[in-house]
Amino acid sequence: MLYRKREDGKAVAVGGRCPHRYFPLGESQRVGDSIQCGYHGITFGADGVCTRVPSQQTVPGVYKIPSYSLVERGLWAFIWMGDPDKADESLIPDMKAIGYGLDGYHYAPVSTMYVEGRYQLLNDNLLDLTHLGFLHSSSIGNDANASTPEEREVDGQHVRSRRFLKDAEIPPLLAQAARWEGKIDRTADMDFYAPGFHAGLDETFIAESSRARKARCLAGIPLAGRSRSLPAIQGRSLPCGAMPQSVISTASAFALRQTCQ
Ligand code: FES
Ligand SMILES: [Fe+2]
């Protein structure tokens, strides 16, 4: 369960089930910076420690809910739900390296998708952009996305997959955005930071002019979560195998810079 403290505005990630009778705390009540369980009123502070049991004078020390490490960077909250001793902020992607906060770009959250499937399948999807020419042929891709050889760099937990398209047909959505029907040069890039963060860069250069359109799409993929829906990406369902207990959600930020001279 996630919420922001009123006292100092800091975001908090705590377990979502009351240890008494497992009532969902996300459907309970905030009292100041604490959560009061909606069933029998047992109350937990932002650190997860029980502070009140309405039906008795004493507070049992065993009553607590998990409290998780949380670091806010850019538009994201990075939460570590594993062994607390292994929480390592240095593994969070560097915001400058992923292109967040660059001059001339406007950054805004654009979507959150819930996908019933193993999170690795979405990593596969974002790292294999040959699918643009087929799954997204009516919008942002065409055959050149598949036929142009990939240049790949692997550096620790970072993988860069990049294609430099030369003298390619312009895909429909880009043609509309750029008001252009001729050939283009294009860089299609995806940077992957294991285990679940992607930073995409798309640069389109219009031949015979100095016009360029650059876009960055940044997506964080939680490794666990819950969802009630199976949404679509670009109007089609993700080809994910059904894994009922494992759900993916992405929170994306999209930044666009367009230069027309
Ligand atoms: S289930 Fe939460 S107080 Fe009883
Ligand atoms: Fe796609």
Image (cartoon, rainbow, N blue to C red):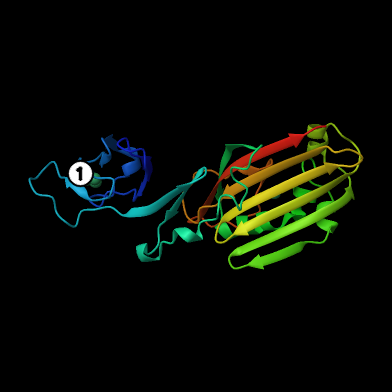
Q: Position of residue 86 (x, y in %)?
A: 40, 65
125 with respect to 247 (left or right):
right
Residue 137 in sight: no
Q: Position of residue 177 (x, y in %)?
A: 78, 33
Residue drawn at 28 percent across, 39 percent down: 33
Residue drawn at 65 percent across, 45 percent down: 217
The picture quadrant where one finds residue 125 is bottom right
35 with respect to 100 (left or right):
left
Q: Amino acid at mark 1?
A: Ile
Quarter occupied by the C terminus: top right
Residue 150 in sight: yes
Residue drawn at 68 percent across, 58 percent down: 127
| Label 1 beta carbon within 8 A of ligand 1 | yes
Name the quarter showing ligand 1: top left
Q: Nearer the viewer, residue 215 or 261?
A: 261
The picture quadrant where one finds residue 154 is bottom right
Residue drawn at 73 percent across, 64 percent down: 152
Q: Which residue is disc 1 drawn over?
A: 42
Q: Position of residue 12 (x, y in %)?
A: 36, 45
What is the count of numbered marks?
1
